[in-house]
Amino acid sequence: MRKEKDYNLIDPTWCKGCGIYGLSSAFKKAAVAVDLNPEQLVVVTGIGCHGRFNNYLRCYGFHALHGRTLPVATGVKLANPGLEVVAISGDGDAYSIGLNHFLHTIRRNVDVTYIVVNNQVYALTQGQTSPTSQMGYVSISTPLGSRECPFDGLRLALAAGATFVARGFSGEPAHLASLIERGLKHKGFSLIEVLSPCVTHNKINTYQWYKEHIDWSDQNAGYNARDKRMAWKRLLNNKRKFPVGLIYEEEKATYESLVLRDREMPLIHGDLSIDVNALNKILEEFE
Amino acid sequence: MIFDISVMIAGTAGDGILFTGNVLAKILKREGWEVVTYRDFPSNIRGEPTNYTIRASLKKIHGRGDCIDVLLVFDCQAVMKHIKRVDYKGVLLCDGEDVLRLSSYDRRGKTFHEFPLRKLARDHFGDEIFKNMIALGALCHILDLETSIVEEIITKAFLSKKGEKIVQKNIQALKLGCDQAEKIVEPEERHPLKRKKDIDRLLVSGDEAIAFATLSAGCRFFAAYPICPASEIWQWLAKSFPSYNGLVVQTEDELAAINMALGASYAGVRAMTSTSGPGGSLMMEGLSLAGMTEIPIVIVHVQRVGPATGMPTKNEQSDLNLWVYGSHGDFPRIVLSPGTIEECFSFTVKAFNLAEKYQIPVILLTEQDYGQNVRTVKKFDVSQVKIERGKLLTQEELLRIKEYKRYEFTPDGVSPRVVPSMRNGIHMVEGNEHDEKGYREEEAENRIRMMKKRMRKLRSVSKDLIPPKLWGHRKAEVGIIGFGSTFGPIREAMDRLQREGVQTKYLQMRTLWPFSSRKVQAFASSCREIFVIENNYSGQLSALLRSQVNDLPEITSILDYSGLAFRPLDILTAMKKVL
């Protein structure tokens, strides 16, 4: 049985109190719970404070370009479906510059676990407004207050046909760990958004603020995450609060199970050279 | 006796001109002729003028010809448009009566026939769709082609999809066209062709040659976004990859295409993407990532007319700058430019080996003319295909290493590569500047060493690159430099100049980056006059040569940015103005 320290590489240097610490601890808990082999784990990150994640984690890591985590993760997974592939993005990475990839990866239902660290601000670039910042949010990029409506990534995901939609809070790592664990186990694309306070650049959406704006009603008896109508109802509730927990899950064939001819044989294996006679045979169509 | 003939089929997009032309090209190939097709299509599906020229010759040809010998048109507007290109003694068949209104000047030396293709199709078969087969029949009569070959082609194309009845109807239409043509065309208007044997030859487009080479070279992952004129590569791979455990993914855009290919390549599979025009611009970001992360990738860019959406189905060479210089930061890359269909095949195989041996992005830069038009070529020598994966460690080798470093400093700049899932190989692949193990590192000393390590690969690769090829007379004092699909018209123009007593030589640039400036310099210094011929406005190749080669003498640029490929005559005329 592996331990959390098996995933430690070096000590992280995020700002003291950053929400990503909570995610980091939750991720390792989940990895232990499913006994992830670091050598079979690929973590792809984007650009943002979350992007350091795999520099601190012991596993195969790929630090991609801003917004391009999901295409890279998809390529890795399709080439070798035996790997556990986790992609991590921030709210800018996922919902702004990478939004197109977000929706289309959901549509494909590739078996990638996608963690979106949502701090409602562009922290790495010194605090600009993000696509999840609230209407009226004042920042260096919107000194008069943002005039754009924020996105709700979970609603987008559900509308695009996501098969696993969840939200956690980095202030509650144990709860978050259980969501990540379920996401890792889910066969198909799983979205786990993490409400993650930025202690340096976002003085509005603080730990205290999130505590007041989180709707924990997934704990209620009677909620069925396999019921899409219930999921929509939770996401569309009008209480100006973030519903957390596992919102929705369904089973559906993964993209790789549909397109790969031989799932047991990753594209990376096998003899690449084709027999000369076979190649000549192919050429007959041009004769 | 005819040695070289061009048949143009013209009409409106949606007339089925491509199918008719392709069948004709195949018949001519089977009769042993060298064939080159040239499509001049609008970028829409229906309603605009379109034409397809099939050129056949007894000697090797590589591009379109100067004139048209036989013009077959489905509507009279097309006659007005192309009449000037119809050669003396040319034959023209037109579905319509407007030809009679052409001026006697335009008609001089040419024979016109009204040929009611649509009416014949309607009257005999109840459907205008058979006009194409009637047209083919007429062409078979004029060119004295074996209709049995057409019947075989029709059967192959239609039997499984449409059934015996349709096959028979098409064959009847073919015969009808043949008989009708016999009635109206005088014997002396026919262009009977001498036959040769058709042995070990293919009729193939550059896109298809590249796709076939991609499969042969062991590539098993292809991600792309649909775009003219590169989609044929994809379509061929989509058909053939599944039997070889390969995968084709249609991505949401070109950003995803290149990044997905990089992800797959990082995981250990040979990967490729292809694009054109604006798709190339979108890929610039990922190209830079490939350079930084040292992940092998092959990118095929089939050039079309820019800027912006430009003319998506027409020919140009204006993306040289994009791929030689494009994207942010300094990083090594290789840009190859095939000049023949055989080179489309062999350079693609080479591209995959270079990409893996040097862990570097390799770009195959071609043009619409080569991408979509078909040409006869000698059957590819597939026994020459060798798959070289470079410093890709085995599990045993990796286990023997005490501390694996993905970006280890090495004399040739290439570090041993492993793929995820291997034991003892954990590392980072970083788009940020990184240390030998791949972890982010911004210290100046490391930065300088890492830049030098990556850029060193350009020096290491030089021995492995495809050198420029010299054609013509070594001692000639008139020199031509070009790249890609200008190969055909340049070679033909050279032959004609030779007949007129002017000796020339031609340096075919086959690697656009990096290239040996020494070889270009040696070539240039032995010339009295140098022409650089390219299909773009600004002379991108000239500018590249000037930036890399010292003491280049004055260059005369011959440029064409009309969207059409050069004809030999265009080059001949432009050169003669100077010589």
Image (cartoon, helix red, strand yellow):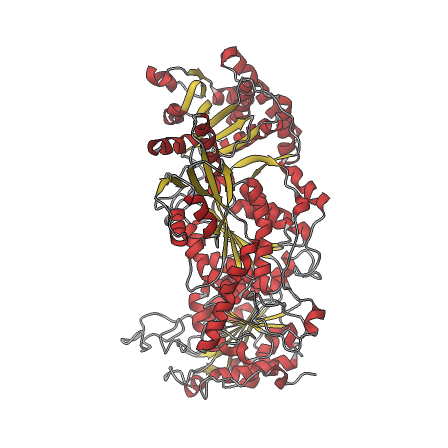
Residue ID at (54%, 13%): B182
The residue at 57%/49% (across/down) is B348
Q: Quadrant where the C terminus of chain A lies?
A: top right
- Nearest the viewer among A58 and B323 is B323
Residue B363 at least partly seen: yes
Eyeballing the image, is A141 above or below B477? below
Q: Looking at the rendering, in which quadrant would you find the N terminus of chain A?
A: bottom right
Instruction: Tell me if residue A49 comes above or below residue A65 in the rendering.
Output: below
Query: With B561 as the anchor, is B57 left or right in this view?
Result: right
Most foreground residue, A22 or A64: A64
Q: Is residue A275 above or below residue B49?
A: below
Residue B390 horizontal/vertical position (percent) = 63, 61
Coordinates of residue B303 in the picture (x, y in percent): 45, 46
Residue B155 horizontal side relative to residue A144, left or right: right
For residue A94, side relative to residue A111 (left or right) = left
Q: Quadrant of residue B107?
A: top left
Vertical position of residue B271 compared to residue B45: above or below: below
- Position of residue B132 measured from the top left corner of the image (x, y, whole percent): 52, 26
Which residue shows up at 64% across the image and 29% down it?
Answer: B198
Give the quadrant of residue B263: bottom right
Let me know if residue A107 appears in the view.
no
In the image, what residue occupies the spot 49% across and 14% down?
Answer: B189
Rendered location of residue A39, percent (x, y):
65, 74
Q: Residue furthest left?
A: A144
- Which of the 4 image quadrants contains residue B31? top right
Mark count: 0
